[in-house]
Every structure is written in C-alpha cells, then in structure tokens.
Image (spheres, helix red, strand yellow):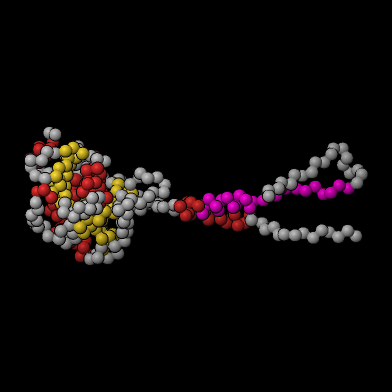
Amino acid sequence: MLKKKRRIGIAIDMTPMVDVAFLLLIFFMLTTQFKPPEKDKITLPESNSESKSPESSIITISVTARKPEYGNQPMVRVTYRKGGEEVQQQIAPTMVKDQMPGVLSTARAANPAAYMIVKMDKDAPYGVMADLMPALQQAKAPRFNVQTDLEAKGGFFRRPRAR
Amino acid sequence: MGAVDTPERKSKGKKGKGIKRPKRRLGIRIDMTPMVDVAFLLLIFFMVTTVFRTPQALEINLPPDEDVKIEIAESKVMSIWVVSDDRMFWKRGGKDVPWARTSVTGLKQVLAPFRANKDLVVVIKIDREARFNNMVDVIDELDGASLTRFSLSTLTPEERAEVGAL
C-alpha cells in the first residue's frame, strides 16, 4: 500500500482573526467622536510655539470673531468648573472692562490653581484683548496662555524652529 | 502564496460511465495572510505617525501690578505699531526717527539684527479694531528672535492719525 505523503507545515485559518480586527476597527470608527460640537467656531491664530496648551484644570476665556448674531460684535465667554459642574458666563465685549475682573475672581476662587487659557479668534478685534489684560491683572492672574494652532507651513515632518 | 483552486471541469456526456473520477472540489480557498499583513502594516503606520492637532499655547506673563512705570532711554526702544487694516510700522528711537512700513513676514528681517538683544525694549501698540492675529504674529516673531521683553498697548487716536496717513 502506498503511504500517504506526510504533510509539513501548518495552515492557520486567519479569517476569524481578521473578522474580529475589522469588527473592532469598524466599532471604533463609528463610536469615536472627535470633538464635542462647539457653540461658535473659533479659528485660532497660528504660531510656532512648541508648548502644549494645558487641557485640565483650566479657566477658558473664549472670544469669537465678530458675528452677525451678536450685532456684528464678538462674544466673550468664561468657562470654568465649579463643584464638578461646568459654569459658563457670557460677557458682552463692551462690558469686559467692568465685569471681567469679578467673573475671573469668582472663577479663580473655585479653581485656585487653574491655568488661564485665552482662546481668541484670529479675526476678533484686538480691543477685547486690550481690555482683558488689565482684568487678568486685577484678578491676580497675570500669567495666561494664548491658545494657538501650530503654523501650517513645514509639511508632514515639521522641523522645529531653531531657538 | 495565494492559490486559487478552481473546480475541475467535467467533460460532458461521460456521466456515470467509465472510471470513477475524483470527487469534485467545491469552493475556493484564498490565502488571506498577505492582505492582513498589508492591512496591519498600514494600520500601524498611521497609528504611529498620526499626530492629533492639539492646540499650542503662547504664554504671556503680565506684570503683577497694573501701574508700573519704567523709564527707558528712547534709543533702546523699538516701536511696532499696527493699524486696523493690518498695516504694520516700526522704528527704533524717538520722535525724530521716521516710521518704516513692514509686515508680518517683513518683521523677521527687521528683528534679525536685534536677536537676543537684552537691552532692547519692544513697545507694541495695536489698534483696538485691528485683528487679534496681529498680536499673536508679532509676539511669535519676537519669540523667534528671542526678544521676550515687550509692552503691549493700544493706539491712541493721535497715534493712529500719525501712522494712518503713511
């Protein structure tokens, strides 16, 4: 009787593994939410700054560009956390000088060690910033971060600028 | 490598006659390994190279007290003024020095000779109606030239008139 040739090597059926991999891939693709929708789109100015903006323990002061819905004026909002809840206060740009120190003091009382983040649209008028700076000084928060986007030029592998 | 087994073709009209043929194979088998290899390779490549766009920050430290007056010799002062239509002017020195027009891109050349100059104090004045972008651009250029001492203020109407006509 002829002996059957012995088989060498093993064959593993990859199909279930691929099935699982694709299932996971599709699951994460569908469930990932990239950014919570924002109330007003803020286009950040671009800079070459290398330091990252802090993301937790922050008090955010956001300033939009001039918007038709706000009577062709920018809108200023202060967002901070108080007792585990997010508090947001709106301030008209003309009232920044008067109201901002008080609002910022309250925000700082709730988060004494928080970083001040100014998230300002690149097309917002500079006057808002000019009013904001004395308010920050009055609220004893002279140190703040201006949020920017990384400068687009430079391509995929951006070379860090020589300092 | 990928092998596709096609079912053997049966010749017509010989059904049930003669020698028994080997059982017809049904279905095809494709080796998935190279496809999976490529898929995972791409997945890993994009996972490793992806950089999420996290916002950067320019840190600004204001003097703690509001009303601090510092006397500086005029010759050490460099003024950069920005008017509302994004036009930028600069000069170094006092009133008798004429203004020179510049721009965000031109500022790099303007600042190059003063790189890391500790004595220089930069006075930035920006019109209230000018875009905020101007402030970030100017500070960014100063940062690039290692000039970290600067003052920020707004243009008075007289100052606006002074450079507005240029």
Residue at (35, 45) in percent of width and height: A152
Task: Pick the residue in front: B115 or A111.
Answer: B115
Above or below, comparing residue A21 to residue B125 in the picture? below
Task: Pick the residue in front: B114 or B7.
Answer: B114
Above or below, comparing residue A102 to residue A94 in the picture? below
Relative side of A54 to B128, left or right: right
Percent coordinates x, y for residue B85 in the rendering: 19, 37
Task: Pick the residue in front: B30 or A93.
Answer: B30
A93 magenta-colored: no
Q: Residue furthest top?
A: B165
Percent coordinates x, y for residue A32 in the rendering: 44, 53
Percent coordinates x, y for residue A16 in the rendering: 62, 56
**Which quadrant of the structure image shows residue A105?**
bottom left
- Is residue A127 something that shows in the picture? no
Relative side of A21 to A108, left or right: right
**Which quadrant of the structure image shows residue B106?**
top left
B29 magenta-colored: yes
- Is residue B39 something that shows in the picture? yes
Residue at (9, 57) in percent of width and height: B68
Q: Residue furthest right?
A: B18
Task: Pick the residue in front: B83 or B10.
Answer: B83
Relative side of A133 to A43, left or right: left
**Magenta-colored span:** B20-44
Q: How many labels, in total?
A: 0
Percent coordinates x, y for residue A54 in the rendering: 31, 59
Residue at (21, 48) in percent of width and height: B114
Quadrant holding the C terminus of chain B:
top left
Residue at (77, 59) in percent of width and height: A7
Above or below, comparing residue B98 to residue A96 in the picture? above
